[in-house]
Amino acid sequence: MSRALGRLGTVLAAALGLLAFAAVAAQAAAPPLRPDLRTMHIPADQLYVDSSEGPTLLHLSNEVADRGVGPLELRPRAEHGEDCNHNGDPSDDRHVSQILYRDKNGDGVYERKIDTGVKRVPAGCRYYHPEHGHYHFDDFARYQLRDPDTDAVVASATKISFCLLDGYHVRPGLPGSPSNSQYTGSGRFAIDGITGMSVGWADLYSAFLFGQWIDVTGVAQGQYCLVATTDPDNRLEELDDTNNAHRTLIDLDPSAETVSKIGSC
């Protein structure tokens, strides 16, 4: 009898193990809930020209929203001493992974307490930004001034870094969009902090912040297409990589320090 009970216990344990393994395997196979990053329009009061510091700079704001089915989340990896920003100081940066939550119950909507399985994707570098006083994710945006007829680049900024947080609830009606900010920005002050953007939320970088400009010194007066692109190197996994740019037709006169919006281009 005891041997029979022992065999039964072994069978039950094996069955439970198989069930647990199947559950883990099912969660690992669940499709990831991807963000969809969109660059928003530039308000007229967030577009100006200034040459008081020397070069003539076209200042612009940049607002990026997540209109996907999952959050954009970035977590620094555990490795140390990598110097991924190549400034000679390995203590001020970390490689980061994009965290994609898996749709455990298959409803196509991100639910924080249910969709806990993750897919990790190498995404780039996170480093300390001394002018802003916190950590940024590198090369998140690109700003270009283009000829509206030929689309040739007339002037451009170096790729812009962001710290990423839930700044504005721009699409509260999107499925899976939380009513309260989940990525509050607290992670931007610690080298191992988690940053990101929830579904239906946006992060705004004002035209008055350091680095929010294109050097237009010597650019002739005329009409140009101002192009702001999110994730220009396509390092982040999204639902759609074709909708990351916003194009604004402007009338620019750098010597007179004037700029006005005309429409789209």
Image (cartoon, rainbow, N blue to C red):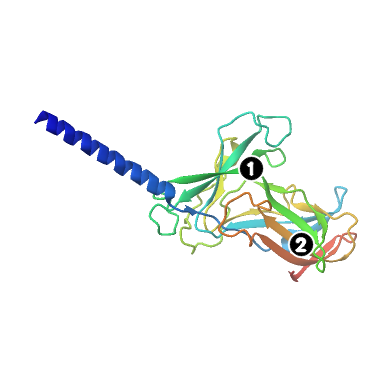
Residue under label 1, please give it. Answer: 124
Q: Can residue 135 be seen here? A: no
Q: Residue at x 86, y 60 (%)?
A: 257
**Marks 2 and 1, how far apart in space?**
26 Å
Q: What is the crowding at mark 1: few (fewer than 14 residues within 10 Å), some, or many (at least 20)?
A: many
Amino acid carrying label 2: it is: Leu
Of 50 and 232, nearer the camera is 232
Give the image quarter of residue 262. Answer: bottom right
Position of 243 with respect to 257 (left or right) is left
Name the spot of residue 229 as percent of width and height, x first.
69, 57
Which marked residue is nearer to the observer: mark 2 or mark 1? 1
Marker count (numbered)? 2
Name the spot of residue 228 as percent of width and height, x first.
71, 58
Q: Residue at x 64, y 54 (%)?
A: 204
Residue under label 2, please give it. Answer: 226
Amino acid carrying label 1: it is: Gly
Name the spot of residue 131 as percent of width and height, x first.
72, 41
Classify 260 as above or below 153: below
* Badge 2 or badge 1: first in the primary sequence: 1
* Mark number, residue 58: none
Numbered disc 2: secondary structure:
strand
Mark 2 in CB contact with mark 1 (< 8 angstroms): no
